Image (cartoon, coloured by chain):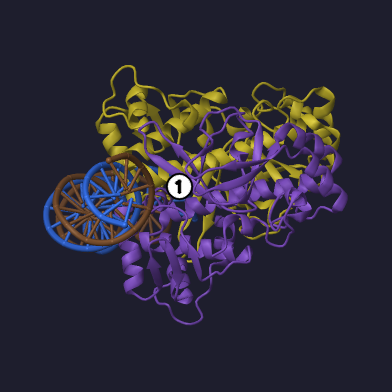
Chain colours: A yellow, B purple, C brown, D blue
DNA sequence: CGCTTACTTGAGAGACTTCAAGAGTTGTGG
DNA sequence: CCACAACTCTTGAAGTCTCTCAAGTAAGCG
């Protein structure tokens, strides 16, 4: 099996050059999307450092002052908020190429805590320097607005399933979303590892750990998935999509929920 | 009772000048926040027109191409998304000074439909011209980023109550949020009109219309609120806050949920 | 090997929904 | 200006989904 570090290097050579945007396998999913060579070079200059984050380590905590955005280089993260009663709501799971910390721009302090789900690495992007660069590289600014807007859509999609989907529908949507995102990164859309615990999934989908466990069992019993610990295989994509879209039967001709999955992140 | 038009003019004189940002009573809640006279003048120039939207009229529909953001001048709006099964999720209620359409920047088409809850007016802000202005007015750009970030926080707060609050808690949070926002606009935080139907509230909070109706009855029976049709009075702020924060008793010393209300929008 | 952590499964309870009926309000046309 | 229709809201009763509580299994780690 490939290690995380190998995954991060996919498409690029190993070495010092690897830490440049132009050499990164995920540049087309990330901030430098659409930039030319020279613009990418300027972006490289402001990226402070590649920072390692160990499994279960906090990249940042709620209410910490905001200085930088972070782009995931490899590994996985969860972002979560805790309310007054101590209940945790996970606001998302982030993987390579995705941007962290945009919730903090408005208030100057992080609204979410960010924790690594496995040994991971991020690119630290000092926001003040990024702002300076916006003035010089309009392409970058426009793409940044797209990313922030997509983040809004992503959260709205979460509202959609939290607000009016049943447990099965939420869970199917979640699995298909992961599948879509792995596909976009060149990995198998049918077989992947769940990097988060059952509890994390529950805290994301507004369900309990027991419900998640039962859903996994039921989906497996129905032949839709195979599960071995955190190793997951989607065996019946069409049925899962029918479930996610709220169609009663997994019949042929069911419209796939592309848009939702793409933006749910 | 004041009409909407009178409300919109609050703090300004009536006439042609009224349609300028500098004359608008909500400039400090809206896009021009923090701009000086001359910068505000440049913003004025790009604002296409003040557009009237009648009650129940669509300001824009889902999947329509995106050209402009809209700032609410007066009145109220709801934004909603409909999923494949035809269920509606209301993603928010907007009032004077709030910005609409940021979800559409990423994809170039509106992810939400926007409907006026009463006769209202918006300022249309062509996004391409706004982008041009960003290059000339850095203050505007920085504030725009703050607004988008706050929108992300707002949606995350919605995730928070949809994901792990009980019906009473959600509803109390909702009422306090309205209260806070009216207060910020100079209106009474204790007494206001619900501009949306019970069904709309339900579609926002992930509950049914019957549940909302029962909640209103129960809150009234508990002496926390008074309701007459859509006219609402908050009689016991501390108890509502205790409920919203998840405290068991409405005892003294309960920490108010300021941050949540402020950003929930 | 024993401890801790992560997960699974069952049974009962509770919260909210669904279904149903009725009351109140608003709007419209004669 | 009234009568009727349409819509919104309220309330009750039954049902269902998910949670809570509880126990047990499996895996990881010292």
The x and y percentages for residue B252 are: 48, 82
Please state if A145 lies on the left or on the right of B249 as rendered: right
Closer to the camera in the image, B235 or A173: B235
Secondary structure under the numbered disc 1 in the rendered image: helix
The x and y percentages for residue B92 are: 51, 48
The x and y percentages for residue D24 are: 22, 53
Indicate whether A232 appears above or below A55: above
Q: Residue at x 67, y 25 (%)?
A: A28
Closer to the camera in the image, A40 or B8: B8
Question: Looking at the image, how many numbered discs can be counted on the residues?
Answer: 1
Would residue A60 be seen by someone viewing this image from the given angle?
yes
The x and y percentages for residue A26 are: 65, 28
Which residue does the numbered mark 1 point to in the structure image?
A204
Please state if B87 lies on the left or on the right of A62 as rendered: left
Indicate whether A143 appears above or below B76: above
Q: Chain of mark 1?
A: A
Would residue A20 be seen by someone viewing this image from the given angle?
no
């Amino acid at each position: 099996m490939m290690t995380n570090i190998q995954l991060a290097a996919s498409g690029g050579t190993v070495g010092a050059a690897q830490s440049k945007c132009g050499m990164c396998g995920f540049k087309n999913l990330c901030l430098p999307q659409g930039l030319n060579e020279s613009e990418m070079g300027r972006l490289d200059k402001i990226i402070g450092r590649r920072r390692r984050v160990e499994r279960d380590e906090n990249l940042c905590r709620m209410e910490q002052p905001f200085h930088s955005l972070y782009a995931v280089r490899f590994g996985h993260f969860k972002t979560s908020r805790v309310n007054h009663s101590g209940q945790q709501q996970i606001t998302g799971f982030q993987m390579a190429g995705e941007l962290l910390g945009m919730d903090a721009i408005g208030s100057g302090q992080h609204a979410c805590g960010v924790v690594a789900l496995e040994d991971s690495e991020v690119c630290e992007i000092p926001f003040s320097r990024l702002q300076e660069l916006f003035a010089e590289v309009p392409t970058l600014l426009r793409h940044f607005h797209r990313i922030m807007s997509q983040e809004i859509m992503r959260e709205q999609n979460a509202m959609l399933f939290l607000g009016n989907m049943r447990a099965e529908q939420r869970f199917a949507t979640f699995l298909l979303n992961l599948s879509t995102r792995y596909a976009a990164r060149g990995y198998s859309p049918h077989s992947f590892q769940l990097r988060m615990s059952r509890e994390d999934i529950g805290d994301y989908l507004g369900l309990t750990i027991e419900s998640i466990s039962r859903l996994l069992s039921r989906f497996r019993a129905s032949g839709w998935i195979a599960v071995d610990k955190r190793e997951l295989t989607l065996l019946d994509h069409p049925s899962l999509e029918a479930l996610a879209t709220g169609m009663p039967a997994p019949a042929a001709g069911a419209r796939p929920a592309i848009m939702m999955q793409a933006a749910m992140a």
